[in-house]
Image (spheres, rainbow, N blue to C red):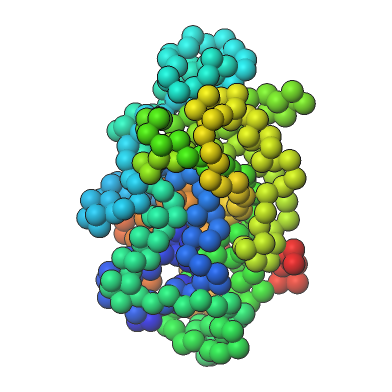
């Protein structure tokens, strides 16, 4: 069976690996480069139980376990490690008794709770993990093709491939996994709306000065805006910080994504308040990305209704890196076996939401 996966982010490459490992003939089609968008610019934080009590719980718990298995089985060089995770405030008191203060944070930070232990929280370096999944898929025969998909090839109403840069590429199944850019496929498939939530981040060169301790904080800016900064030191000696989001229009090309005016300066100022280590460390990257979200906050994972042989996997929001392994496993089962066994995909059925009118598909040029 030949499966065409449109999108070279963490979801697309995780699906490719699971399919190829089971013997499928897989082609990943990416417009620019592997992990060129959110999969290369996100935090890479993993949590076992933070989705408990929601429809995401089975997917998240299965994925958390798979992350550990993949790191061991594949001898992954993507910086997988367990972390201790804390919550607190910056510049104001919460009224709760501080539980501790890591040595690398400033006195303006009040740590009020431990949110996770090394048994429940972990991390990967997202770009390295995504590239690692693509390499693992290629070991099993998968192929990467660079180019832009402009439409679906049909025979008798069923999917038979895609139109790729003026040519046709045959396939028995087509998977849309383009993050927020999956909305472009709504021009030729009955897909629900998919939106992009823009987030900004900094990556610092902190060396070995910060231990594996993640922070989730709250901060009231002087102007009154509330920010929720997140800090993730990584195994490769860098530290990732995010905390400013916006609803800026989605550009047509991921390569055109740039930070909003002033957002990076605000984030730098916040980092200087949070930690003297961050204040004196060189900045390696100032960046922005769009995370895919849906109307009800749940991902779209499953068959596209009405067009046999087509599937979609997107809309994972902030949990894309976490939930990629189980999404890949479940999609491989669905495509090759006709049903997903490891995780119940019914809460994520694309048919639960009304398809977007193709005439309303619009992104910024």
Above or below, 195 against 311 in this view is: above
Q: Position of residue 57 (x, y in %)?
A: 41, 43
The quadrant of the rendering that contains the C terminus is: bottom right
> Looking at this view, is 153 or 34 the one in front?
34
| Residue 192 visible, this orientation | no
Q: Is residue 89 above or below residue 131?
A: above
State the image coordinates of residue 118 (x, y, percent, origin top left). 31, 32
Could you tell me residue 318's position as x and y percent? 53, 46
Q: 176 left or right of 210?
A: right
| Along the line of sight, the residue nearer the viewer: 49 or 81 | 81
Residue 329, by quadrant, is bottom left
- What residue do we see at 56% from left, 72% from top? 31
Residue ID at (73%, 51%)? 248
| Residue at (45% x, 16% y) in the render | 101
Residue 68 located left or right of residue 113: left
Residue 68 falls left or right of residue 121? left
The outermost residue toward the left is: 73
Q: Position of residue 300 (x, y in %)?
A: 52, 59
Q: Nearer the viewer, residue 192 or 105?
A: 105
How many numbered callouts? 0
> Can see residue 138?
yes
**Of 226 and 330, which appears nearest the observer?**
226
Residue at (61, 53) in percent of width and height? 290
Image quadrant in which the N terminus is located: bottom left
**41 to 145, vertically: above or below:** above
């Amino acid at each position: 069976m030949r499966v065409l996966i449109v999108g070279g982010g963490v979801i697309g490459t995780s699906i490719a690996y699971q399919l190829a490992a089971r013997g499928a003939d897989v082609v990943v089609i990416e417009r620019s480069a592997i992990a060129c968008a959110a999969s290369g610019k996100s935090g890479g934080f993993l949590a076992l139980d933070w989705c408990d009590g929601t429809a995401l719980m089975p997917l998240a718990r299965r994925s958390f376990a798979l992350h550990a298995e993949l790191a061991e089985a594949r001898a992954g060089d993507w910086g997988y490690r367990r972390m201790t995770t804390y919550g607190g405030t910056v510049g104001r008191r919460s009224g709760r008794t501080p539980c501790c203060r890591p040595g690398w944070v400033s006195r303006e930070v009040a740590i009020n709770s431990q949110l996770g232990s090394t048994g429940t929280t972990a991390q990967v370096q997202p770009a390295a993990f995504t590239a690692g999944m693509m390499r693992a898929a290629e070991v099993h025969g998968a192929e990467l093709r660079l180019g832009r998909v402009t439409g679906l090839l049909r025979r008798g109403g069923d999917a038979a491939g895609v139109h790729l840069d003026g040519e046709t590429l045959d396939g028995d199944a087509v998977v849309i996994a383009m993050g927020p850019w999956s909305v472009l496929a709504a021009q030729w498939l009955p897909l629900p709306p998919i939106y992009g939530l823009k987030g900004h981040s900094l990556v610092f060169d902190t060396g070995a000065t910060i231990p594996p301790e993640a922070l989730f904080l709250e901060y009231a800016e002087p102007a009154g805006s509330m920010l929720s900064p997140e800090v993730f030191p990584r195994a490769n000696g860098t530290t990732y910080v995010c905390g400013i989001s916006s609803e800026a229009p989605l550009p047509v090309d991921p390569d055109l994504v740039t930070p909003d005016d002033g957002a990076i300066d605000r984030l730098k100022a916040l980092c200087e308040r949070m930690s003297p280590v961050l204040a004196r460390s060189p900045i390696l990257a100032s960046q922005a990305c769009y995370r895919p979200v849906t109307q009800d906050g749940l991902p779209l994972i499953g068959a596209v209704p009405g067009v046999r042989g087509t599937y979609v996997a997107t809309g994972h929001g902030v949990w894309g890196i976490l939930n990629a392994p189980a999404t890949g496993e479940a999609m491989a089962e669905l495509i090759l076996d006709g049903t997903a066994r490891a995780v119940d995909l019914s809460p994520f059925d694309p048919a639960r939401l009304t398809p977007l009118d193709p005439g309303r598909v619009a992104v910024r040029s």
